[in-house]
Amino acid sequence: MGVCGGIAAYKSAELVRLLRAANARVRVVMTATAKEFVGARTFQALTGEPVWADWSDDRTGMDHIDLARWADRILIAPATADCLARLAQGRADDLLAALCLASEAQLVVAPAMNQAMWRHPATQD
């Protein structure tokens, strides 16, 4: 599960809890700005797994590739406008984007932004 930095990030903890209750194995990759809204320890406690938040967490230099291969699905919730733009442009400038680009797993995004940002033609593209 990818968590981007927006006010909706706090809802991700509840989503992780619900996924775990449904017996899903969940690993969390956060953007740097997501950590400003929810701490990595919250997700570590909920998943029982390490949490990745930036390149320094990529202990082997290949963790993002291992995570990309491990995942059956990648859910990004919330997916901010910035996150969607980086994915659409194929930019791997953070660990979450690199993981998404390196994975063949189904990518599911849950956009979260104000209505004007969501309706903007650049976001829709």
Image: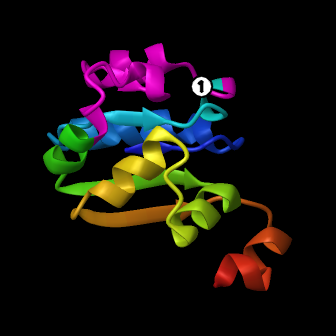
Q: Is residue 44 left or right of residue 40?
A: left
Identify the image quadrant of the N terminus. top left
Residue 111: x %, y % from top left: 59, 63
Q: Is residue 27 left or right of residue 2?
A: left
Kindly identify the residue that appears in the image at 73 percent across and 60 percent down.
Answer: 113
Q: Is residue 13 magenta?
A: no
Looking at the rendering, the stretch of residues picked out in magenta corresponds to 36-64
Q: Is residue 72 left or right of residue 74?
A: left
Kindly identify the residue that appears in the image at 35 percent across and 48 percent down.
Answer: 99
Q: How many marks?
A: 1
Identify the image quadrant of the C terminus. bottom right
Residue toward you, 124 or 55 = 55
Above or below, 121 relative to 51: below
Kindly identify the residue that appears in the image at 37 percent across and 56 percent down.
Answer: 100
Q: Is residue 125 left or right of residue 15?
A: right
Above or below, 64 relative to 77: above
Amino acid type for the residue under numbered disc 1: Val
Residue toward you, 21 or 119 = 119
Kindly identify the residue that appears in the image at 48 percent across and 20 percent down.
Answer: 40
Above or below, 38 relative to 68: above
Give the labeled residue for mark 1.
38
The crowding category of the residue bearing disc 1, from other C-alpha atoms within 10 Å (few below 14, some 14 to 19, many at least 20), is many
Residue 22: x %, y % from top left: 19, 44
Q: Secondary structure at mark 1?
A: loop
Residue 102: x %, y % from top left: 29, 55
Residue 62: x %, y % from top left: 25, 33
